[in-house]
């Protein structure tokens, strides 16, 4: 059972601010998704072969071509902030 409290908690973890109307809508939609999954769990899949992809695929390899890369100074020219020759970004882990 998905509640507004659960959705609000998950939104907080995701740093997403939700209006009350959005909170109610998402709660309803997530509950519908879980109900659909419950229906899928009732299916007999004992004779279905496990697969990682719907269609058969294979790796396609190509030759590596050595090319000039972007110089450090040019790359850092796009940076909002830099420190000791690297991009400086805000701390994301509290």
Image: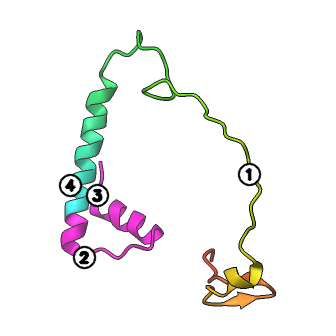
Crowd around label 2: few <14 · some 14–19 · many ≥20 (10 Å): few
Q: Which of marks 3 and 1 is nearer the N terminus?
A: 3
Q: Mark 1 — residue?
A: 65
Q: Quadrant of residue 4?
A: bottom left
Q: Earlier in the sequence, mark 4 or mark 3?
A: 3
Crowd around label 1: few <14 · some 14–19 · many ≥20 (10 Å): few
Q: Which of marks 3 and 1 is in front?
A: 1
In the rendered image, the vertical position of residue 41 relative to residue 70, given as above or below: above
State how far apart marks 1 and 4 are (Cα): 51 Å
In the rendered image, the vertical position of residue 72 relative to residue 23, given as above or below: below
Q: Earlier in the sequence, mark 1 or mark 2?
A: 2
Instruction: Kindly report the secondary structure that dominates the magenta region of the rendered protein.
Output: helix
Q: Mark 3 — residue?
A: 3
Q: Helix, strand or loop at disc 1?
A: loop
Look at the numbered discs 1 and 2 and tell me whether their residues touch, using CB distance below 8 Å.
Answer: no
Q: Which region shows up in magenta?
A: 1-24
Instruction: Please give left or right for residue 73 compared with residue 77 in the image.
Output: right
Residue 69 point in image, percent of width and height: 73, 68
State how far apart marks 3 and 2 are (Cα): 15 Å
Q: Nearer the viewer, mark 1 or mark 4?
A: 1
In the rendered image, the quadrant that contains the C terminus is bottom right
Would you say residue 53 sits in the magenta stretch? no
Crowd around label 3: few <14 · some 14–19 · many ≥20 (10 Å): some
Instruction: Please give left or right for residue 25 compared with residue 43 in the image.
Output: left
Q: Nearer the viewer, mark 1 or mark 2?
A: 1
Look at the numbered discs 4 and 2 and tell me whether their residues touch, using CB distance below 8 Å.
Answer: no
Decide which of 8, 65 is in the foreground and name it: 65
Q: Mark 2 — residue?
A: 19
Q: Which of marks 3 and 2 is nearer the N terminus?
A: 3
Residue 86 point in image, percent of width and height: 75, 81
Decide which of 18, 51 is in the foreground and name it: 51
């Amino acid at each position: 059972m998905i509640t507004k409290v659960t959705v609000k908690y998950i939104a907080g973890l995701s740093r997403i601010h939700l209006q009350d109307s959005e909170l109610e809508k998402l709660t309803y939609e997530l509950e519908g998704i879980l109900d659909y999954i419950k229906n899928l769990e009732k299916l007999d899949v004992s004779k279905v072969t496990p697969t990682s992809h719907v269609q058969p695929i294979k790796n396609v390899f190509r030759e590596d071509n050595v090319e000039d890369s972007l110089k450090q100074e040019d790359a850092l020219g796009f940076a909002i902030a830099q420190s000791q020759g690297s991009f400086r970004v805000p701390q994301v882990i509290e």
